[in-house]
Image (cartoon, rainbow, N blue to C red):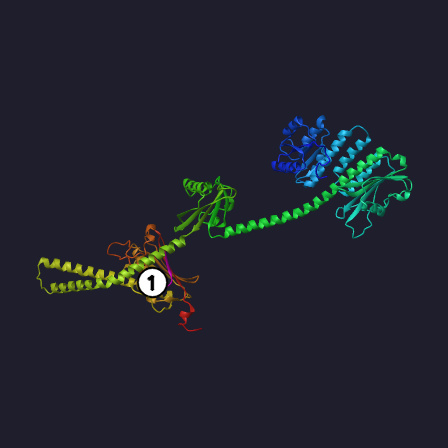
Amino acid sequence: MLAANDQSSKPATLLVVDSDERARALLVRTLEGARYRLLEAGDAPTALRLLHEAHCELILLASEMPGVDGLALCRVLRAQAATKRLPIIMLASRADEELQVGAFAAGADDFVVKPAARPELLSRVSAHLEAARREHALAGSNRELAFLADLGRGLLVALEPLQVVRRVAGATYDAANAALCAAVVTANTNEVSAGDVDDGAASSEHKLVACVFDREGSAEGPSLVDVEKLRRWLLTNPSASVLLERHGDFFLRDDTHRAEYVAPLRFAGQALGALVVAFDDAADCGETEARLIDAAAQQAALAAHISSLYAAARASSVSLAREVERRTAEAEAQRRFTEAIIDSLPVSLYAVDRTHRIVAWNRNRELGGQGVPRRNALGRSVFDVLTRQPRATLEREFGRAFETGQIERIEQESTAPDGHTKHWLVSKIPMRTDGAEVSHVITVGEDITARVEANRAVARTEKLAAVGRLAAGVVHEINNPLATIAACAEALETRVAEGTFGASRDVDDLREYLALIRGEAFRCKQITNGLLDFSRNRAGEPAPVSLTEVVKAAARLLRHQRRAQDIEFQVEVADDIALVAGDAGQLQQVVIILAENAIDAMPQGGALSLRTYNQSGGVALQVCDTGVGIAQENLAKIFDPFFTTKEVGRGTGLGLAVCYGIVTEHGGRIAVDSAVGRGTTFTVSLPAMNEEIRDGGRDV
């Protein structure tokens, strides 16, 4: 009887009162399948209005509602004559004993925990409707009707087999004026808690639960029931009630009664138990008593079935709870794993929704130069968090992503706290979670500083190589004319000194002009020699070199320069420094060029620091000064050939280009850190010498 199969042709009208729209919709879908006519209300006033406008046969009422809750509404309904006897099933979101007691105290007919199993809910609704209709049809006519109503209400809250047999046996005993009354139901072994009257056979999947009422009260157990005889009778699946008048056919062990009326508890074509009523005389069991016992048996069968459904639902709920717990744990583990993946990405990542609220913020976004802790970012407007970026720019970028749904990549530059320029590739990635509309935009910021600097280094190397090839072809062609010019100037100077041109004022001018010609020729010669050094192929057999010794030798040479008199030299070298493979003379040239540039940057004096130290995978050389520094716009050009910030005549712009070429050929890198007014630090990093070079190529 899962649906209203035995109801009249006109479907029953049910009122569902629940402020939770989703829970209400679920109840409606469940009940609509049973062909009920349904009305819905989300609050108490709406429910009262619908009850006034339409006739309802049952109310499913949620206990928890804002304003007037279900318990208060239930009291109101019980106080009104029109709804005083209307069946009310109280719905609750939790199995709370105190709430259940309060519901019944307010006048509820039943108490169901949401979400209820569909069979159980339909069975309860069907049972309430059936009980209500019977009560309505027979109320006030005789004791049979009162009995059925009371028994029906009592059985609706009987959720275990023992509770069913107690209520049925006691109510039937009183209503039928019987000598004895026994109610017996078949229960699964998992449902039995007390009142087991079976013989304890281990192979039996079902046992009989019984309760017997006599003149002295109730008794549970097998003492008054012939279990084997009753079991055999139930195995025949009886379909009709019988009146027994022979003592040998009785199911109850009592010598005083003279008749037994036995009604099977049938549900869905199966005998689930029996209701055995004993009378002192057969005449005491008339038509009224028989009809009453049959009605009690029907309700007992329904209650027994509901109790089995309850037991099954309880077992299912335990299994479901375990499954939910397992899946929740799996989902939580998956969520943590996904977060770990996102946090492990070497990019800064965050996501915003269409209201520009931040919904994701990864670990690298917390640790950046503009790092903001995740707890201070999630849920806030992106414009309130990323305050260093112009709001109008961010709005345009996000607006384009939401509108076009296209990925947009933007290269940006920022200045780190230490003054370094950082290069970023920022990608705006639209995301669609449901439907075609862009719901979120993911922003990924990738630090491409190393790539930009590498590209610039490649371009610089290619430029140096091109200049080197040009210089190699031009230097020799220029040196010969320069040598001739210088030689002619020296010869003329000699003749002037010997008096060949006399002693006129024109001779003095000639002497001055010849000196200028010779000086400029020698300066051109220095430039071409620098070009020749720049273009010369430096490849040779590498040898073990100690940077510490190179720095010490360079420092000795630099200290004797006249322009270094106001410079304080600080030499910090490591004695256990690893060896490098290369040319000691070329590396010393690098140190001297860097140091001379540092001295030139300190015209008023200062401190020059030369350091060597071990680092991961190799060794490092640092040349630091406290001079005027290099402007940020010039840092990217200082290694270009012929670029110089010195006055005309004081530098050729080839020194740092030569350094860059030497360091690159040694497999190293050269980096610069400088700020105007703070000074400059050049860092040369070289790989440590491998064993093959150290051992001269011998097999070891």
Q: Can you say which quadrant of the picture contains the C terminus?
A: bottom left
Name the side, left or right, on which 433 lies relative to 79.
Answer: left
Q: Is residue 624 visible?
A: no
Mark 1 nearby-residue class (10 Å; few <14, some 14–19, many ≥20): many
Residue 451: quarter of image? bottom left
Q: Is 354 included in the stretch rendered in magenta?
A: no
In the image, 586: left or right of 249?
Answer: left
Q: Nearer the viewer, residue 643 or 300?
A: 300
Q: Which residues are magenta?
A: 666-671
Seen in the picture, residue 328 relative to 460 is either above or below; the reply is above
**Residue 637 to residue 49: above or below:** below
Question: Residue 598: horizontal and vertical position, in percent?
Answer: 32, 57
Looking at the image, residue 512 sits to the left or right of residue 186; the answer is: left
Camera-nearest residue between 271 and 490: 271
Left or right, 118 with reference to 681: right
* Viewer-nearest residue: 352 or 532: 352
- At horizontal 48% and vertical 42% (from top left) the residue drawn is 438
Q: Is 240 in front, or is 119?
A: 240
- Residue 670 belongs to the span the image colors magenta: yes
Element assignment for label 1:
helix
Rendered location of residue 289, percent (x, y): 84, 34
Report the quarter where the N terminus lies: top right
Residue tagged 1 = 662
Q: Can see residue 283?
A: yes
Residue 236, percent across and down? 81, 45
Residue 621 coordinates in the image, percent (x, y): 38, 61
The residue under the point 74% across, 32% down is 132
> Which amino acid is tagged 1?
Ile
